[in-house]
């Protein structure tokens, strides 16, 4: 895998990133460490986490993922220097008072969260520090519409950028990024950074997969023209695009045991639990099989080969799953297959947007 540059930063990473949000919930620490070992052995030099993790978010597991990664760094001297480490500062609480009590995300919140992440990760610097979701009220995590009446933002983007700039200047952060952002947000962060000599966002981490392609409806042009890289998360749609739910569905006695959507009611209430999301996934999964591919191979290859995507974040719960996802690298999709994929999208749109 040839490394790619993240935005206009000096960070160069593999086009596959190891996502870790299951560490501390579905994945225990020994298994997480085995996954990290194997990922590094296979050449992946980019890992992503967040202060909020593990997921589904609970007070009891807040910060657990970063702690597990920090313990792995401590056990493996030299590993930290081989990796580009990304983590995130959570946005406003969104019903999680254990993250922060206020309704906003002040410069003091950003500074405190960074310090806590550095401590849990047992590192002196975070390579890519991202805002997990905007302080502004935006349609994210499956919401469809922007509603100005729900706007409660209190911290200007300029203030957020200044806070991040102080972390960069102090050597605690190398580059900054956004997540779950809109085209307006990306433009405004870049405009203010250039106007005031503040750090320029290198990346945006947004959902992107066969059943959730909203990034292609304007955000991709924004990022291309502004020189910001897309980090695609949930390429397998929480498992819907692996085929594991095709027969038994996402809930009930026939649903796969131990799988993320079937295991957590909170996840089923989100976009991944929508009946139309499963219906569309079944169509794509059948198409993959018709072309001699596994559903996961086709879904991953779709992200791995799209010009919009700089690095695809894969989340796994076992070493075997990690190997399967990495082995999909190099899979190509014919123009005919891509045309059939687009036909399904035209018919079913983006049910997990």
Image: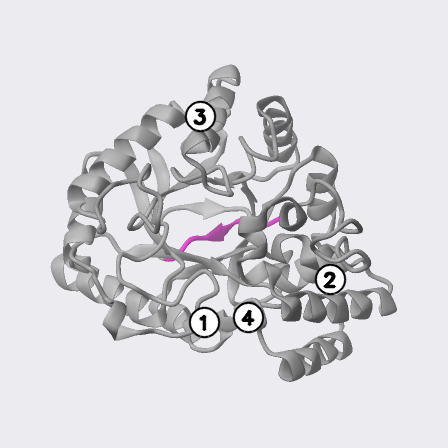
Q: Say whether disc 2 or disc 4 marks the residue closer to the N-terminus.
A: 4
How far is disc 1 from disc 2 in space, using C-alphas?
A: 21 Å
Total label count? 4
Please tell me whether mark 2 or mark 4 is closer to you in this view. Answer: 4
Q: Identify residue for label 4.
A: 213
Residue at screen point 45% across, 47% down:
12
Q: For the magenta stretch, what is the residue range?
A: 1-7
How far is disc 4 from disc 1 in space, using C-alphas?
A: 10 Å
Please tell me whether mark 2 or mark 3 is closer to you in this view. Answer: 3
Q: For residue 67, which numbered disc appears in the image?
A: 3
> Residue 310: percent from the left, percent from the top?
51, 58
Whether the magenta-drawn stretch holds residue 5 is answered as: yes
Please tell me whether mark 1 or mark 3 is closer to you in this view. Answer: 3
Per the image, label 1 sits on a secondary structure element best described as helix
Image vertical order of residue 65 relative to residue 309, above or below: above
Per the image, label 2 sits on a secondary structure element best described as helix
Q: Identify residue for label 1.
A: 220
């Amino acid at each position: 895998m040839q490394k790619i540059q993240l935005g206009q930063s000096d960070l160069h990473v593999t086009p596959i990133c190891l996502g870790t949000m299951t560490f501390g919930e579905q994945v225990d620490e020994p298994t997480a460490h085995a996954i990290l070992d194997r990922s590094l052995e296979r050449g992946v030099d980019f890992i992503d986490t967040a202060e909020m993790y593990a997921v589904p978010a609970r007070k009891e597991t807040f910060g657990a993922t970063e702690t597990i990664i920090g313990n792995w760094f401590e056990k493996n001297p030299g590993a930290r220097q081989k990796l580009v480490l990304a983590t995130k500062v959570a946005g406003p609480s969104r019903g999680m008072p254990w993250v922060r009590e206020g309704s906003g995300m002040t410069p003091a919140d950003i500074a405190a969260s960074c310090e806590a992440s550095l401590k849990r990760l047992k590192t002196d610097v975070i390579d890519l520090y991202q805002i997990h979701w905007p302080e502004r009220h935006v349609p994210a995590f499956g919401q469809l519409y922007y509603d100005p009446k729900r706007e409660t933002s209190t911290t200007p983007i300029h203030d957020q950028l200044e806070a991040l700039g102080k972390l960069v200047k102090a050597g605690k952060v190398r580059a900054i990024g956004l997540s779950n952002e809109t085209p307006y947000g990306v433009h405004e962060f870049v405009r203010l950074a250039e106007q005031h000599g503040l750090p320029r966002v290198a990346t945006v981490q947004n959902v992107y997969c066969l059943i959730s392609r909203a990034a292609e409806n304007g955000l991709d042009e924004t990022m291309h023209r502004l020189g910001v890289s897309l980090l695609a998360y949930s390429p397998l749609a929480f498992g819907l695009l692996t085929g594991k739910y095709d027969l038994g569905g996402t809930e009930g006695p026939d649903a796969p045991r131990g799988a993320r959507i079937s295991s957590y009611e909170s996840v089923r209430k989100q976009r991944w639990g929508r009946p139309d999301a499963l219906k569309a996934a079944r169509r794509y999964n059948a198409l993959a099989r018709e072309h001699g591919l596994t559903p996961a191979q086709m879904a991953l290859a779709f992200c791995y080969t799209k010009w919009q995507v700089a690095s695809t974040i894969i989340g796994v719960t076992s070493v075997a799953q990690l190997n399967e996802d990495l082995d999909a690298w190099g899979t190509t999709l014919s123009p005919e297959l891509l045309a059939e994929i687009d036909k399904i999208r035209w018919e079913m749109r983006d049910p997990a947007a």
